[in-house]
Image (cartoon, coloured by chain):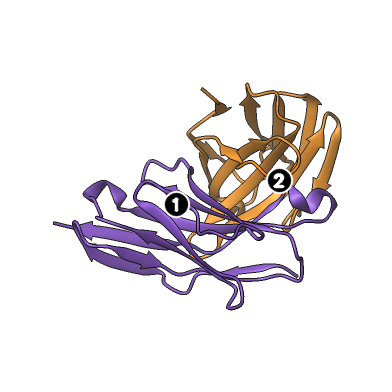
Amino acid sequence: DVKVTQSSRYLVKRTGEKVFLECVQDMDHENMFWYRQDPGLGLRLIYFSYDVKMKEKGDIPEGYSVSREKKERFSLILESASTNQTSMYLCASSPPGGADTQYFGPGTRLTVL
Amino acid sequence: AQKITQTQPGMFVQEKEAVTLDCTYDTSDQSYGLFWYKQPSSGEMIFLIYQGSYDEQNATEGRYSLNFQKARKSANLVISASQLGDSAMYFCAMRGSEGYNTDKLIFGTGTRLQVFP
């Protein structure tokens, strides 16, 4: 059974802290994605990676960075968390080619105080 | 630019009735794919159904079917015989066809469906 896991379901951080959100997939997928989900806005792509050490900006990369040192792991980094980064963060993975669905993790609800 | 529009923020349906969730899209690509996902209150995104732009028949998966009207650029989800467990957010999404755009998805804003007894 395919599986995408995220390090935390709920996270509370303070403004200015450095925050790491971790995502691990066990399907040997090339592609990995980070989205944020806000009410009324749907899912918006922050960054995606199509190979180890490769990354591309999505629609809303400002304030975020990513790291992909191993194929199975994709990290989202908030260098200095701000209150407007309070959101649900979803990680996904997929094989290349676009014919298959993306497989999602359970999400991390981040609150920045 | 590609865009997905879901105009129904919320929908109500009685148990055992059918319901249609609307989705329109905008793209200049000739080859594209359309997805529907369900997100229960627990938060996980569950893949429901997929329609390719060249598929001649509407996709079906159990109680889910996709009413694909290419000329109108619509890809509505039809849920037959609604169940209480169908209460959730539903998202329509589209992938493109050029380079890495084939692997990225663009999502609509979602429709919250509530099924009542």
- Residue B25 visible to the viewer: yes
Q: Secondary structure at mark 2?
A: loop
Label 2: few (<14), some or many (≥20) within 10 Å?
many
Q: Chain of mark 1?
A: B
Q: Is residue A71 above or below residue A75?
A: above
- Tell me which amino acid carries mark 2: Gly
Residue A100, x across and y down, in percent? 64, 41
Same chain assignment for discs 1 and 2: no
Mark in front: 1 vs 2 = 1
- Residues under labels 1 and 2: Cα distance? 19 Å
Examine the image and state in which quarter residue B96 appears: bottom right
Q: Which residue is mark 1?
A: B60
Residue A107, x across and y down, in percent? 52, 39
The purple chain is B
Residue B85, x across and y down, in percent? 27, 46
- Residue A6 visible to the viewer: no
Q: Secondary structure at mark 1?
A: strand
Q: Is disc 1 in contact with disc 2, using a CB cutoff of under 8 Å?
A: no
**Towards the viewer: B54 or B19:** B54
Q: Quadrant of the C terminus of chain B?
A: bottom left
Residue A98: numbered disc: 2
Q: Please tell me which residue is depicted at 57% across the width and 44% down the height of the picture.
A: A89
- Tell me which amino acid carries mark 1: Thr
Instruction: Check the rendered structure and report the hue given to chain A.
Output: orange
Q: Residue furthest bottom?
A: B72
Residue A38, x across and y down, in percent? 52, 57
User: Horizontally, is B47 left or right of A53 in the view?
Assistant: left
Q: Residue furthest front?
A: B56
Q: Quadrant of the N terminus of chain B?
A: bottom right
Label 1: few (<14), some or many (≥20) within 10 Å?
some
Q: Chain of mark 2?
A: A
User: Horizontally, is B63 left or right of A60 in the view?
Assistant: left
